[in-house]
C-alpha cells in the first residue's frame, strides 16, 4: 500500500499516551471539512497547528476510518480560525483564548509573522502593552525551541513527556548535551532508565564494549540502588547487575571500567575484610563523615545540676502534665547528652515528651530550633509543640542555584538545642547535612517511630543509630490512659507485634475509631469507596471529604493504585463544570478545586516533596496555577506542573510524616508485592480520629505476617561501633 499525504489542522487531541507519545487527533482539511481522525506518534502537538502527514488510510472496527501517520512536517496555521486556536491553546505564556482572538482580529493572517519578525507591533493590539508584547515574543521563541528539540529527541524514540523533562533540565543546550553523552539521561532524568538511553546511544554509534557505555552502566546501577535505599553494592553484586544489564560476561572489561571510575573519583571503594563495596562519592562521604561527627559529639561531656532538673520537672507538673519515669528520664538525658533518640509507637507519649522537653529547654534560656523532614510534618510539629518548626531544608537554608546548604560546617546553626521530629524519614545525605551544620555544643534530639517505613532516600539512619548501641535511646512503651480506648492505637500495637488487628465491620451499632469494610473486587471497592466518602464518613461523622479525609493505597499503578483512584475520586469530589478553569500538561489535567500534592522539592518556590494543597485559581491566559499549600499561596508556571499530581489518593510512602483526621486505606490482594508489616502499620498510624480499612482481611493478614523488611546496604552502625576503619 502506497503512502499518501494529508494536510490538516488539529482541532483537538482526543487521546494521548505518555509512555509512547501515541496520539489520536481530530482534524479538518479541505478534503475533509467535516473532520478526520489521525493516529500516530507525535511530538508536542497543540490544537490549531497545521500538519502535513504521510501515511496510509486504515479502518478501525470500533472507530471507523483513520489516517495512520508514519511521518509528518509541522506547518504554520494558514487560516484565521487555525491561528486563533493555535495561539489560544495555552502553549505560549501570555496568550490565552481572549488575547489570541484580539491578536487575530488586529493582525489577521499576518499574526504569526508579526510575532516572529516584528514583535514590537504587538503593543498596538488592545490589551497588550510593551511588557506583554516582549513576554509573548520570548514565549513564542521558547516554544519553537522546545518543539525543535522535541522533534530531534523523538527521532530517537523519546516521548514528548520525557522530551519536556529533558528540555526543562538542560534548556536550549539539550541537543548538544544528549548528542555528546546520551547516558546522562539515565541518571539525570527520572524515569528514563538505561534501556531507553542505551538505544539512543546505539543510534549515535555507541554500543557493545564501548568504555562510555560500560562506565555509564555502572554509574546507572549505583544511582538506581540509592533510590532503592542502599548506599553501596558489594563487588559481587555490582558484577552481577552489570553483566545482566550490559549483556557482557567479560569481567576484565568491567573491572577496567570500575578502575577508571575509581581513578576519576566518580565512584568510591570501601574494603571490609575480604570484600569490596562500591559507593557513589556523595553517599560514601555522608555515611563516613556522619559516623565521625557522631563519635566526636559523644566525647563532649555535659554536666547538669540535680537542683535545676527538679525545678524543671516541678514547672512541667505545674502546667498540669504528669510524666512517666521514662519521659522524665528522656528529659533528664536531653540535658546530659549531646545526642539523644526518643522513640516509641502511637499513644506512648512521644508528643507530650517532645512538648515538655522543648518548653524545659526554652525555660532555661537555651536557644531552641525545631524541624521535620517534610512541610506537613513541620506544620504538625509547630501545632503540637507550641514553637515554630521548619522543614530541614529551610532550616539549613538550601540554595537551589548552588545546590548546597548555606548552613554548614563553616556557617553552623546558632542554637543550643535542635529537636528533629519524624526522624525515621531522614535519609543519609540529609542527616549528614544536618550534622555538619551543628556546633559541637548543640544538643541534637531525634524523635521518631523506628517501626515505620524507612526513608524514601538512601540509608536507614534512625534504625542504624539505635542499632549501634553507642547513643542514648529512650524507648517509650506505656500506652496512656486517654489512648487505651482507641482501636487505632490498640491495632497499631497488635500489628507491630505480628498479630491481626481487631477488624470491626460498621453495622450502625458498633462504635469505634477503626473500621473494616470488605471489598473483594475492583467494582465493589470503587462503589463502597464512593459511598464511604460521600455518606458514611461525611454525613454521619461530619468529615469534609477533601480536607479531612485522605485515601491511601500501597501502589501507584494498577486498578487500585493512586492513578486510577484519583481519576475516580476527582470525578466524584470535583467534577468538571463550565465555571472551573482547567489546564492541560501532557497527560496531566488540573482544574480549580483539585486536591494536589508536590512530588519533588522546589526550593525556588519553597514547596517540598509531600506538600499538599488545593488549586485556588487557574489563569488560562498566563498559564499559571495558584495553589493554597496549608494557607500559603504559591503560583506555579506550566513548566512546574511536571512535579504536581492529584492527591485525592496518595501512596502510604507519600503519607509519611503526616496525620489526617480520617484515613481510608485501600488494601487488596493485588497489592501483595508491597504488603509488609511496617507499611500497614505506617498507614494505620496516619489516622488521628478515624481509620477505615477497605479491601480484604487476607491482604491485611499477609501484611501483618510479613515482617521481612528489605535490608538496606549501609554500615553506619558498624562505623559507629568502630568495627572497622
Image (spheres, rainbow, N blue to C red):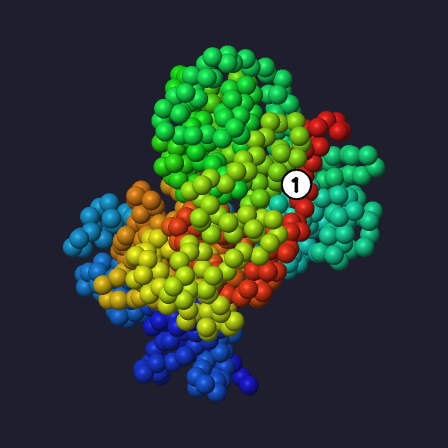
Q: Provide residue 238's location: percent of width, then percent of height.
A: 74, 47
Image label count = 1
Dividing the picture into quadrants, the one containing residue 387 is top left
- Between 646 and 423, the one nearer to me in the picture: 423
- Between 318 and 361, the one nearer to me in the picture: 318
The residue tagged 1 is 231
Q: Provide residue 454's location: percent of width, then percent of height.
A: 58, 44
Q: Provide residue 440's location: percent of width, then percent of height.
A: 55, 18
Give me the residue at 38% from left, 39% from top.
379
Is 171 left or right of 475, judged from the image as shown? Answer: left
Is 217 left or right of 452, judged from the image as shown? Answer: right
Element carrying mark 1: loop
Is 210 left or right of 689, judged from the image as shown? Answer: right
- Between 123 and 227, the one nearer to me in the picture: 227
* Residue 18 appearing in the image: no
* Residue 66 appearing in the image: yes
Give me the residue at 24% from left, 48% from top.
132
Give me the residue at 47% from left, 23% from top.
417
Give me the residue at 42% from left, 54% from top.
513
Circle 1 Cα neighbour tier, 10 Å, few/some/many (<14 / 14–19 / ≥20): many
Looking at the picture, does residue 119 appear above or below residue 422? below
Work out which quarter of the rendered image holds the N terminus and state it. bottom right
Residue extending farthest left: 126
Q: Provide residue 163's location: percent of width, then percent of height.
A: 49, 56
Work out which quarter of the rendered image holds the C terminus and state it. top right
- Between 596 and 361, the one nearer to me in the picture: 361
Amino acid at each position: 500500500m502506497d503512502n499518501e499525504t494529508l494536510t490538516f489542522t488539529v482541532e483537538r487531541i482526543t487521546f494521548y499516551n505518555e509512555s509512547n507519545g501515541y496520539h489520536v487527533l481530530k482534524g479538518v482539511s479541505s478534503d475533509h471539512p467535516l473532520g478526520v481522525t489521525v493516529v500516530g506518534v507525535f511530538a508536542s502537538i497543540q490544537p490549531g497547528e497545521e500538519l502535513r502527514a504521510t501515511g496510509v488510510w486504515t479502518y478501525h472496527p470500533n472507530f471507523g476510518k483513520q489516517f495512520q501517520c508514519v511521518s509528518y512536517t509541522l506547518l504554520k496555521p494558514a487560516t484565521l480560525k487555525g491561528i486563533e486556536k493555535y495561539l489560544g491553546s495555552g502553549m505560549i505564556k501570555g496568550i490565552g483564548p481572549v488575547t489570541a482572538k484580539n491578536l487575530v482580529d488586529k493582525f489577521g493572517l499576518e499574526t504569526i509573522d508579526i510575532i516572529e519578525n516584528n514583535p514590537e507591533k504587538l503593543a498596538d493590539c488592545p490589551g497588550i502593552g510593551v511588557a506583554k508584547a516582549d513576554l509573548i515574543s520570548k514565549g513564542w521563541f521558547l516554544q519553537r525551541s522546545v518543539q525543535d528539540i522535541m522533534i530531534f529527541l523523538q527521532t530517537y524514540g523519546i516521548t514528548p513527556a520525557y522530551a519536556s523533562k529533558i528540555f526543562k533540565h538542560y534548556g536550549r543546550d539539550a541537543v548538544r548535551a544528549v548528542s555528546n553523552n546520551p547516558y546522562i539521561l539515565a541518571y539525570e532524568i527520572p524515569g528514563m532508565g538505561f534501556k531507553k538511553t542505551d538505544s539512543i546511544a546505539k543510534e549515535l554509534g555507541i554500543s557493545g564494549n564501548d568504555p562510555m557505555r560500560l562506565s555509564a552502566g555502572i554509574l546507572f546501577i549505583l544511582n538506581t540502588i540509592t533510590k532503592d535505599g542502599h548506599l553501596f553494592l558489594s563487588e559481587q553484586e555490582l558484577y552481577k547487575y552489570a553483566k545482566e544489564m550490559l549483556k557482557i560476561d567479560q569481567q576484565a572489561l568491567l573491572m577496567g571500567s570500575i578502575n577508571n571510575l575509581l581513578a576519576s573519583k566518580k565512584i568510591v571503594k570501601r574494603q571490609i575484610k575480604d570484600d569490596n563495596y562500591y559507593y557513589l562519592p556523595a553517599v560514601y562521604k555522608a555515611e563516613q563523615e556522619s559516623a565521625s561527627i557522631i563519635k566526636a559529639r559523644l566525647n563532649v561531656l555535659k554536666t547538669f545540676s540535680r537542683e535545676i532538673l527538679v525545678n524543671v520537672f516541678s514547672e512541667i507538673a505545674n502546667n498540669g502534665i504528669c510524666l512517666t519515669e521514662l519521659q522524665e528520664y528522656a528529659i533528664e538525658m536531653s540535658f546530659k547528652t549531646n545526642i539523644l533518640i526518643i522513640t516509641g509507637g502511637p499513644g506512648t507519649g512521644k508528643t507530650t515528651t517532645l512538648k515538655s522537653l522543648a518548653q524545659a529547654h526554652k525555660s532555661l534560656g537555651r536557644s531552641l530550633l525545631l524541624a521535620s523532614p517534610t512541610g506537613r510534618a513541620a506544620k504538625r510539629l509547630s501545632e503540637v509543640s507550641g514553637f515554630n518548626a521548619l522543614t530541614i531544608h529551610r532550616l539549613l537554608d538550601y540554595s537551589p542555584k548552588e545546590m548546597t546548604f548555606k548552613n554548614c560546617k563553616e556557617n553552623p546553626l546558632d542554637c543550643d538545642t535542635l529537636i528533629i521530629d519524624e526522624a525515621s524519614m531522614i535519609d543519609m545525605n540529609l542527616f549528614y547535612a544536618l550534622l555538619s551544620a551543628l556546633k559541637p555544643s548543640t544538643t541534637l534530639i531525634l524523635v521518631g517511630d523506628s517501626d515505620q517505613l524507612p526513608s524514601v532516600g538512601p540509608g536507614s539512619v534512625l534504625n542504624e543509630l539505635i542499632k549501634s548501641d553507642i547513643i542514648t535511646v529512650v524507648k517509650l512503651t506505656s500506652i496512656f490512659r486517654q489512648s487505651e480506648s482507641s482501636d487505632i492505637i490498640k491495632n497499631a500495637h497488635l500489628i507491630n507485634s505480628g498479630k491481626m488487628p481487631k477488624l470491626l465491620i460498621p453495622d450502625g451499632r458498633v462504635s469505634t475509631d477503626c473500621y473494616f469494610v470488605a471489598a473483594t473486587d475492583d467494582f465493589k471497592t470503587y462503589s463502597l469507596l464512593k459511598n464511604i466518602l460521600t455518606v458514611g464518613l461525611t454525613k454521619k461523622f461530619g468529615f469534609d471529604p477533601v480536607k479531612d479525609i485522605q485515601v491511601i493505597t500501597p501502589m501507584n499503578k494498577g486498578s487500585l493504585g493512586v492513578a486510577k483512584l484519583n481519576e475516580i475520586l476527582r470525578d466524584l469530589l470535583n467534577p468538571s463544570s463550565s465555571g472551573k478553569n482547567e489546564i492541560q500538561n501532557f497527560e496531566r489535567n488540573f482544574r480549580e478545586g483539585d486536591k494536589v500534592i508536590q512530588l519533588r522539592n522546589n526550593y525556588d518556590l519553597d514547596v517540598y516533596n509531600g506538600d499538599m494543597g488545593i488549586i485556588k485559581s487557574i489563569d488560562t491566559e498566563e498559564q499559571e496555577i495558584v495553589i493554597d499549600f496549608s494557607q500559603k499561596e504559591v503560583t506555579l508556571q506550566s513548566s512546574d506542573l511536571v512535579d504536581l499530581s492529584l492527591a485525592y489518593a496518595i501512596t502510604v510512602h507519600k503519607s509519611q510524616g503526616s496525620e489526617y483526621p480520617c484515613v481510608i486505606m485501600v488494601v487488596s490482594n493485588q497489592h501483595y508485592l508491597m504488603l509488609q508489616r511496617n507499611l500497614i502499620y505506617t498507614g494505620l498510624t496516619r489516622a488521628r480520629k478515624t481509620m477505615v480499612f477497605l479491601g480484604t482481611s487476607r491482604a491485611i493478614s499477609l501484611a501483618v505476617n510479613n515482617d521481612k523488611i528489605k535490608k538496606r546496604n549501609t554500615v553506619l552502625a558498624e562505623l559507629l561501633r568502630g568495627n572497622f576503619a
